Amino acid sequence: MGKPFDFSNINNVYVAARQNDRQTVVFEVLNGRGVFVFMMFFSEEDHSKDQLFLYLARTARMITLKMYGRHEIHEPETNKFLVYLKTQDQAYILEELGLEGGGRGFDFDEFLKGLNESIPQTLSFADLQKNCRTHRDAFGQPELRRVVDSANKIYLIGPMQLDAAKRPREKTLRKLYLHISAEPDVLERFITELKHRNMTVAWTDTERPHGDIRQMLARLR
């Protein structure tokens, strides 16, 4: 199955994201020459709830890892984020680090431990928004095509009321992180208000200026 490793330090940001109804985790860890972007998407409509996407930003490679173990918000101390890194995954990581030749004295187990220890223990909305925009290219990777709806529609039209039987889709709301440069606190309140009012946002692939999120938020209230 590959080299096993428990990315245990993901636990705090994962649990907080679920408790805050964000259903999205994106953060980066720097190690040597490598930029390792951890990405998780776990709303009810996501098919990737048990997957960890590890984007290697310098070499633009994506590693998809199935996570084994318990991932819950209750009794989080028992959670596990066990993955198995295949030989090809390890080769991609060495490439990201600039160690294609293997690296004299390189200890892969120690590298993974160091990566895990560098995982941030908090992820603010502002950091999530910044990380998504910084690594927007990652969302164009084939592995992430299903984590946003209609990825070609990147121009915001505005809020749209949903039928009572429907709920806002995280796959649609995530596009706000990627394509809207609003102040983090304003965007966070906008998304919260949309969910509270059972609304979503409409997008188009026809180029147009984005509306002002602050004004949209004021009209919702």
Image (cartoon, rainbow, N blue to C red):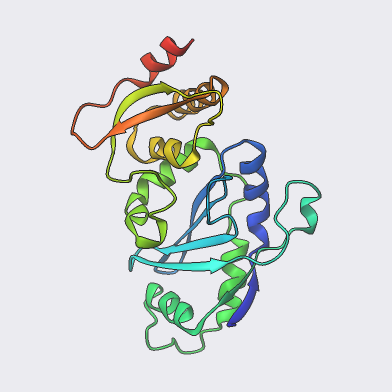
Quarter of the image with the N terminus in it:
bottom right
Horizontal relation, residue 29 to residue 92: left or right: right
Examine the image and state in which quarter residue 80 appears: bottom right
Q: Position of residue 128 (x, y in %)?
A: 48, 42
Where on the picture, by quarter, is residue 115? Answer: bottom right
Q: Nearer the viewer, residue 168 or 190?
A: 168
Residue 53 location (% of width, % of height): 49, 61
Question: Residue 186's spot in the image, x, y percent?
Answer: 45, 23
User: Relative to 83, does residue 134 appear above or below in the rendering?
Assistant: above
- On the picture, is 52 further left or further right than 141? right
Numbered disc total: 0
Horizontal arrangement in the rendering, residue 100 relative to residue 185 (left or right)? left
Residue 77 position (above or below residue 61)? above
* Residue at screen point 53% across, 57% down: 48
Q: Position of residue 213 (x, y in %)?
A: 37, 21
Q: Residue at x 40, y 28 (%)?
A: 201
Please report the residue visible at 55 percent of the width from the left and 23 percent of the height from the top: 164
Q: Nearer the viewer, residue 96 or 92?
A: 92
- Note whether 184 is above or below 110 in the view shown: above
What residue occupies the far left of the structure in this picture? 207
Q: Residue at x 39, y 43 (%)?
A: 149
